[in-house]
């Protein structure tokens, strides 16, 4: 049985969460309402990229799937991920890989 795009996306979101936790980038405290209200791309002016992934991206995409809304068809998170996690070196390879897979899946591209 072939998985739907939504099912594949949920699997990758779970892997993304797992990798953020494995690298101790997962946070237990939510950002403030003011931080979440940013209109800048990736909320770069108020959140770290890992905070944006956890509190904006994962939550928003999961909600879209739950409500059976169309998923984004163009995504390019990989360049931001590569830059954001460069200081982690090879430890971030799996995390960056999962983000690349999400980009490809949601944009309809092959790795």
Image (cartoon, rainbow, N blue to C red):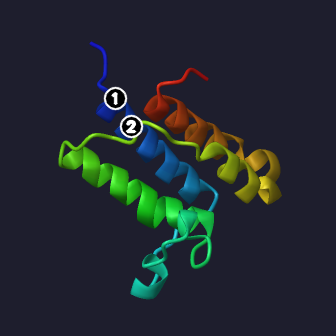
**Is residue 92 shown to the viewer in this render?**
yes
* Circle 1: element type: helix
Image point 47% across, 25% down: which residue?
108
Residue farthest to the left? 67
Percent position of residue 74, x then y: 48, 38
Where, by quadrant of the figure, is residue 7 drawn? top left
Instruction: Indicate left or right for 36 with 41 as reference.
Output: left
Percent position of residue 106, x then y: 44, 34
Mark 1 highlights which residue? 5
Image point 47% across, 62% down: which residue?
54
Image point 49% across, 77% down: which residue?
38
Where, by quadrant of the figure, is residue 5 drawn? top left
69 or 92: nearer the viewer: 69
Evaluate if marks 2 and 1 touch, with contact meaning CB atoms under 8 Å apart: yes
Image point 64% across, 57% down: which residue?
23
Percent position of residue 62, x then y: 31, 51
In this view, 110 is above or below 87: above
Per the rendering, the mark at residue 9 is: 2
Percent position of residue 89, x then y: 81, 50
């Amino acid at each position: 049985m072939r998985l739907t795009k939504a099912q594949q996306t949920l699997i990758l979101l779970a892997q993304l969460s797992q990798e953020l936790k494995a690298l101790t980038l997962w946070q237990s405290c939510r950002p403030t309402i003011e931080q979440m209200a940013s209109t800048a791309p990736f909320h770069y002016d108020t959140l770290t990229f890992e905070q944006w992934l956890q509190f904006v991206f994962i939550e928003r995409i999961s909600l879209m799937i739950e409500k059976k809304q169309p998923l984004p068809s163009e995504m390019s998170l990989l360049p931001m991920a590569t830059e954001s996690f460069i200081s982690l070196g090879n430890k971030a390879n799996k995390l960056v890989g999962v983000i690349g897979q999400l980009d490809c899946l949601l944009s309809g591209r092959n790795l």
